[in-house]
Image (cartoon, rainbow, N blue to C red):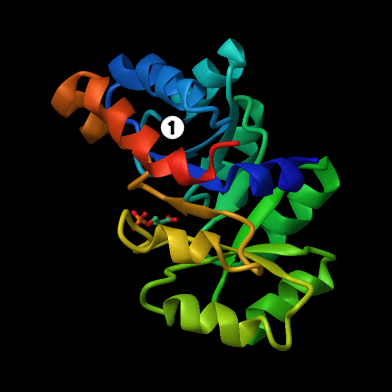
């Protein structure tokens, strides 16, 4: 299933597209490192176009992130998004995704929000912004009452702290822009972006 696969890969790269030029490169870099997921954020005008291209090339499992309205969720799915990530909790987006059988990662930070996610039968939530809302300590505390919930922390997860997040058993996967960014690809035209991703995933490669 979607969540089992994400759990086995550990990484959910969050990618903001400001130029279509580097998208195929990003796709290759992820593939070469045996990563299947990419979350294209609705933080740029090119999100739908990028989702469509990635969906058509079918090399990665493409989803939409920073989805803040039902219309955006629908637009993403029409363009081929296979999963939806929201920064906060939206009843109408969650309802839509469940109806359409599309995996949804809703942003939650408080026990109330997690309980709300549970009321829809969800077992995995995004924990965002992880750094501001207590980081790993918060995940550990929340995992007391919510031992049946798995978290995907994002926001301030970075090269120096991601391993301790991944190693927590209540964390399904980690997300973030540090995994692979367009900026990193542009800066060095691909090679050292690929090298640096290889170093990141090395401890968890099969
Ligand atoms: C998100 O939307 O998940 C976060 O903005 C990712 O945060 P990061 O850029 O610190 O990884």
**Residue 41 visible in the current orientation:** no
Residue at 62% across / 84% down in the picture? 142
Drawn side of residue 148 relative to residue 47, left or right = right
Residue at 49% across / 65% down in the picture? 165
Rendered location of residue 20, percent (x, y): 33, 18
Rendered location of residue 104, percent (x, y): 68, 51
Q: Secondary structure at mark 1?
A: helix
Rendered location of residue 124, percent (x, y): 70, 61
- Quarter of the image with the C terminus is top right
Which residue is denoted by mark 1 in the rendering?
A: 47
Give the image quarter of residue 120.
bottom right
Drawn side of residue 155 relative to residue 165, left or right = left
| Relative to 88, residue 63 above or below | above
Drawn side of residue 91 relative to residue 85, left or right = right
Label 1: how many Cα within 10 Å (few below 14, some 14–19, many 20+): many
Picture quarter with ligand 1:
bottom left
Residue at 55% across / 63% down in the picture? 167
| Of 109 and 200, the residue lying toward us | 200
């Amino acid at each position: 299933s979607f969540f089992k696969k994400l759990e086995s890969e550990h990484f959910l790269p969050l990618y903001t597209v400001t130029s279509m030029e580097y998208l195929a490169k990003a796709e290759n870099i992820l593939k070469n490192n045996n990563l299947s997921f990419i979350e294209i954020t609705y933080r740029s005008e090119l999100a739908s176009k990028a989702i469509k291209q990635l969906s058509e090339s079918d090399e990665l499992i493409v989803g939409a992130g920073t989805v803040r309205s039902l219309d955006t969720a629908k637009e993403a799915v029409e363009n081929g998004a296979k999963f939806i990530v929201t920064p906060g909790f939206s009843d109408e987006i969650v309802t839509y995704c469940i109806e359409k059988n599309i995996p949804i990662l809703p942003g939650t930070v408080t026990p109330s929000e997690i309980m709300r996610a549970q009321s829809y039968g969800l077992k995995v939530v995004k924990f965002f912004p992880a750094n501001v809302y207590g980081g790993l300590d918060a995940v550990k505390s929340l995992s007391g009452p919510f031992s049946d919930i798995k978290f995907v922390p994002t926001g301030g997860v970075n090269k120096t702290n991601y391993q301790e997040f991944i190693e927590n058993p209540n964390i399904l996967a980690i997300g973030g822009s540090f995994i692979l960014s367009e900026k990193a690809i542009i800066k060095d035209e691909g090679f050292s972006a690929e090298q640096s991703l290889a170093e990141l995933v090395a401890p968890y490669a099969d």
